[in-house]
Amino acid sequence: MHQQSIAELRGMLDRREVSSVELAQHFLARIKAHDPALNSFISVTEDEALKAALAADHRIAAGHAEPLTGIPLAHKDIFCTLGVKTSCGSRMLDNFVAPYNATVVERLNQAGTVMLGKLNMDEFAMGSTSESSFYGPTKNPWDLSAVPGGSSGGSAAALAAGLTPLATGTDTGGSIRQPAAYCGVTGLKPTYGRVSRFGMIAYASSLDQGGPMARSAEDCAWLLKAMAGFDALDSTCSEQPVEDYTAKLGEDVAGLTIGLPREYFGEGLDGEVARAIDEAVAEFRRLGAEVREVSLPNSELAIPAYYVIAPAEASSNLSRFDGVRFGHRCEAPKDLVDLYERSRAEGFGSEVKRRIMIGAYALSSGYYDAYYLKAQRIRRLIADDFRRVLSEVDVIMGPVAPHVAPDLGTSLKDPVAMYLSDIYTVPVNLAGLPAMSIPAGFAHGRPVGLQIIGRAFDEARLLNIAHRFQQATDWHRQIPAAFA
């Protein structure tokens, strides 16, 4: 059952070939058997899952099932879940039990999904490898010596290993797309404001966006349909009507115009990764698409701009974790200053501290104009580049990352190299556009992801393009042998 699509599982549930309880038990058993090798889950909510599955079976029997009723999923541990620990992968929140549900969680509960647990992640979503978690690193199912990407590495690893059919993720600078690429699954970063951020613990508020992760574009379409929509509790949430993302999945892509940015295929891109991307683009040509070269000249400025803006916003957002109201508190503080200093020193890991210090520096007196304001101006230039190119082509395609998943430990020795691995994903967040990663082959024995970038609120088109590619190829159906 762990190799079935959501549509296939839906059919099995509706025909009473399997119950929701049996489906939940199947995935819970796989988690118990396989997750010790991966460390993709922080919490497994077995009792809650079986209770929700039983309620889903009653709902199905009464004829009130929705498309996701009875379907198991797992949430990235950045989404608040009522009565369940929400840690953000940090010691700071190791004892935090959320008193409410994030809007995403609430909507998926209302759709009848069955939560299996909370997934591992880089601490406070800061990282590209899922190694900065307080609960230890997550490993890549395709090669246990490799990272799964980050920060939604637990989500990607659990999907690739067949421990859950659906997962939520968040993307601040590529944290859905990059782990999806490294683990050979599908992930969509929606337009900024498409999915509510209420109850999603903030890293960088102008960049963060929740999104769906699954084995296929079709499964992501079902999940996004349930997640998306206006939320009065999130002032940045768009009132743009939600499309039926499954309605256009069968449309032809003949006549589609694809732009390939020359800046994405230059120095630094691994040759085998480039070859896999070229072959994927060639498949689109065979499907009738037109391909042309385009230019995004300010792309090279995205990394320095992002690593000013994101840490600056993080330093503000994480100031609430002070050891007073909630979160980790040091033992026997001498005074208030000692309480603040030791609680934060003990509660935050090294990567989070690094970004807080960078952000505080960028916002400090005398440096705001020189760094933060200049980065925001660069952000506008990057958005203008995308706007110009996407007025000439339908979508932009290219690699998700310049290389395949690196070995565990290598990025910890060189944080700057880790930051540079986001070079193709960060610009999209700065522009607030939708983009997704789909499996497109292998390089050096590890998965490669193809990135598809679209116009604002054009998720339906992206999902259809990805679906047509997946109908013509089988990369998304590949499963690591150890987890088959």
Image (tube, grey):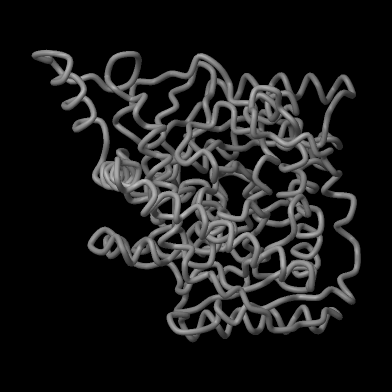
The quadrant in which the C terminus is found is bottom right
Q: How far from the left and from the top, in percent, is residue 348?
A: 27, 35
Q: How far from the left and from the top, in percent, is residue 375?
A: 45, 55
Residue at the location (44% across, 58% down)?
305
Q: How far from the left and from the top, in percent, is residue 5?
A: 73, 51
User: 211 and 180: which one is in front?
Assistant: 211
Residue at the location (56% across, 54% down)?
430
Q: Is residue 206 above or below residue 114?
A: below
User: 313 and 81: which one is in front?
Assistant: 313
Residue at the location (39% across, 59% down)?
147
Q: How far from the left and from the top, in percent, is residue 123?
A: 36, 41
Q: Give the mark count.
A: 0
- Quick check: 371 left or right of 167? left
User: 160 and 343: which one is in front?
Assistant: 343
- Quick check: 468 left or right of 166? right
Q: Is residue 105 above or below residue 182?
A: above
- Quick check: 65 left or right of 205? right
* Rendering quarter of residue 232: top right
- Quick check: 456 left or right of 169? right
